[in-house]
Image (cartoon, rainbow, N blue to C red):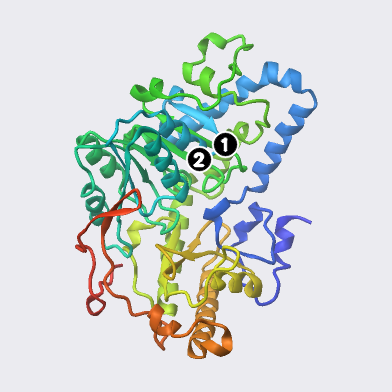
Amino acid sequence: MGAVDEILLTPEGLPKPDPLISKWHLRPDIVHMDHGSSGACPTEVLEHANGLRWELDRGSPEFFLSSWSPHHRRSKEALARFVNADYNELLLTPGSTLGLNIVTQSQQFQSGDELLTTNHAYSSVTMLLKHVANRDGAKVVIAKVPFPVASPDEILESILTCVTERTKFAIIDHIVSRTGLVFPIKRIVQELAKRGVETLVDGAHGPGQVQVDLHDIGAAYYTTSCHKWMCAPRGVGFMWARQDRITRLKPLIIARSGHWRDSAGGSYTWLEHTFEWNGCHDPSGVHSMPKIIDFLETAVPGGHAAMVKRNHDLAVEARKRVLEILDIESPCPEDMIANMATFPLPDSVLPEKLGILPLCQTLWEKERAEIQCYHWPAYPKRIFRFSVQLHNSLEQYIWLAGKIKKALGAEYEIVKTPKENGAPENVAAKNGVMGNGTKESGPAKNGVIENGSKKHESGANDSPPSKRRRVS
């Protein structure tokens, strides 16, 4: 049975996806609205990768002897054109985590140097910076970027406020995983460079979700995972280093070159010989890069640019409907999101179980809805995020908003009678949950944190509850 036939078998009561779901082999009994987490690989790309895997296993010694290097080269050539990079600036990796580690662990810092990131950064980024800071006696500084936020200027200002003469290195998101915000990354890179700070851009949610021009962004380094928005098989990513920064990199894995037997071995670069062979692994995913990019350019008329616009337009419209149905104020202007939208919710009533919020568990177990719902910035505060891909429809997000509204109403019943329902005493007052299902929130504070301690607070970006801003 093909994916097209399965659309007809969508269970009664679930919203219909877009007909373009025929390009994927997704389960029809799940409402897939979380593409940003671990992606979904289109059927034609999976079949192409499987073909390469069969080619490999029909004669692996011959494949690695004569086919591995040419496949690798074609993949990087296609990628270089897609992200406007030079071929010799790119390194194919299993994902953004390896790229982040290669770049960051290659840096050498002095005691007292400051390493900058934001409170929106992925947890692995903060862990990595702390590891390197402990190694060299440096300090980690975390800029408190507000959310909700009214403009890109607020993001830029909150980051630059934390820069001192000791700031040497920064890891900044292109598009944030938690909040879905599109940071003004080119401006951030430029302003940090003026202050002598090198930037590694965490682009895990960049390429594919938006059109990326690495030379235009101009950072020292950029890394991403392609299984998310480029719809690649899992285990495909890349790292980019600006020409003047390539030789500063140090490999985490010491191994011989995978190109040493190639007849054109002399034409391969230091970066390729030093980094690209990490053992005898399955290369079918990274070698599918030309097919991956072909899918992005042909999935809809108008190419990848049209795909980006279609998904953004749907995300904007879906966000409007969800905001209306849940009576939530817009947390950011619509031009500050791409294909992901995040919404603040009333404080969590019950604690997590096995790392899952009760709301997310309810939506999954009762409704088969895949979204992200998590505590942020810390319990009991929480947000939820949906993602938009070609296979999604507006109907799905309207349906989702109704299900969330119902679930929040059920939580309010728990708040009203905490003893009978197992909730803690005074949870309503403690968490600021009011009878209308919304929350009364006091002013948050904008601060900088060094190794877990507060450096300063300004509160400049916050408004009292009676003067909350509506941005659109």
Gap between marks 1 and 2 measured at Cα? 8 Å
How far from the left and from the top, in percent, is residue 413? 52, 88
How far from the left and from the top, in percent, is residue 165? 19, 37
**Element type at mark 1:** loop
User: What residue is shown at x 57% (from left), y 51% (from top)?
Assistant: 38
Q: Quadrant of residue 9?
A: bottom right
Please identify, in this view, whether the residue under mark 1 or under mark 2 is nearer the observer. Answer: 2
How far from the left and from the top, in percent, is residue 405? 50, 80
Q: Quadrant of residue 323?
A: bottom left
Does the CB distance between marks 1 and 2 fall below 8 Å?
yes
User: What residue is shown at x 55% (from left), y 25% (from top)?
Assistant: 253
Judging by the rendered image, the residue that carries numbered circle 1 is: 94
**Element type at mark 2:** helix
Judging by the rendered image, the residue that carries numbered circle 2 is: 97
Residues 60 and 250: in front is 250
Query: Looking at numbered disc 2 in the image, what kind of residue is underneath it?
Result: Thr
Q: Is residue 189 visible?
A: yes
User: What residue is shown at x 40% (from left), y 20% (from top)?
Assistant: 247
Q: Is residue 317 visible?
A: no
Query: Looking at numbered disc 1 in the image, what kind of residue is underneath it?
Result: Pro
For label 2, the crowd category at 10 Å Cα-Cα, with few meaning under 14, some 14 to 19 and many 20 or more, is many
The quarter of the image holding the C terminus is bottom left
**Left or right placement of residue 396 versus residue 174 in this view:** right
**Left or right placement of residue 20 versus residue 271 in this view:** right
The quarter of the image holding the N terminus is bottom right
| Residue 127 marker | none
For label 1, the crowd category at 10 Å Cα-Cα, with few meaning under 14, some 14 to 19 and many 20 or more, is many
User: What residue is shown at x 24% (from left), y 39% (from top)?
Assistant: 192
How far from the left and from the top, in percent, is residue 373? 51, 66
